[in-house]
Image (cartoon, rainbow, N blue to C red):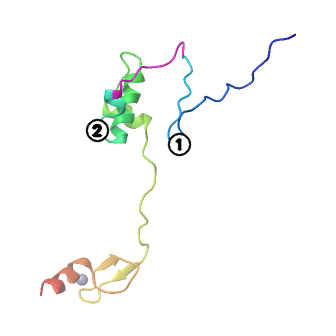
C-alpha cells in the first residue's frame, strides 16, 4: 500500500461558521514577526500599520527616508481632470478655465460679497 500524496493542504476544521480562518504554515526564512500591538494598533491608520510592517520587514541598514519610500511606493498617477475650456469672463474679459460660460473667480467672489 502506498502513502497518500497530498497536492494541497487539507482545509482546516473551523469552529466558526464565519469570520477569519487562519491557515498557519511555518516559514523557515524570509519572514518577519510583527506583534499584535502594531498589527492591531487602535490609533494607527491601516496605511501606517502597513508602512510600519513593511519597514519592519526590511533588512538592517535599508534606507527608509521619505525619498527612498517615495521612490519605492509611487502614488497612483491619477490627476483630477482639468477643464479644457478657456472662457472669457463676462465682466472683466480675463481668460479662465471652466466648462461653463460666466465670470472668472475674482468677479464671482466680488459679486457674492456685494
Ligand atoms: Zn472677471
Residue furthest to the top: 1
Residue interval drawn in magenta: 27-36
Q: Is residue 46 above or below residue 60?
A: below
Task: Give the x, y percent position of residue 28.
Answer: 54, 12
Q: Is residue 91 above or below residue 69?
A: below
Q: Which residue is mark 1?
A: 18
Q: Earlier in the sequence, mark 2 or mark 1?
A: 1
- In the rendered view of the protein, which quadrant contains the C terminus? bottom left
Residue 46: which quarter of the image?
top left
Task: Give the x, y percent position of residue 53.
Answer: 39, 29
In front of the other: label 2 or label 1?
A: 1
Q: In the image shown, does 112 or 98 lie closer to the viewer? A: 112
Q: Which residue is mark 2?
A: 42
Task: Give the x, y percent position of residue 22.
Answer: 53, 30
Task: Give the x, y percent position of residue 21.
Answer: 53, 34
Q: In the image shown, does 4 or 97 lie closer to the viewer? A: 4
Magenta part, dominant SS = loop
Amino acid at each position: 500500500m502506498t502513502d497518500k500524496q497530498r497536492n494541497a493542504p487539507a482545509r482546516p476544521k473551523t469552529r466558526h461558521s464565519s469570520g477569519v480562518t487562519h491557515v498557519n504554515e511555518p516559514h523557515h526564512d524570509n519572514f518577519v514577526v510583527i506583534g499584535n500591538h502594531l498589527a492591531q494598533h487602535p490609533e494607527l491608520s491601516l496605511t501606517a500599520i502597513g508602512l510600519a510592517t513593511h519597514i519592519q520587514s526590511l533588512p538592517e541598514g535599508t534606507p527608509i527616508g521619505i525619498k527612498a519610500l517615495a521612490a519605492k511606493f509611487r502614488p497612483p498617477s491619477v490627476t483630477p481632470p482639468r477643464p479644457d475650456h478657456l472662457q472669457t469672463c463676462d465682466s472683466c474679459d480675463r481668460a479662465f478655465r471652466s466648462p461653463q460660460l460666466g465670470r472668472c473667480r475674482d468677479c464671482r467672489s466680488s459679486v457674492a460679497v456685494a
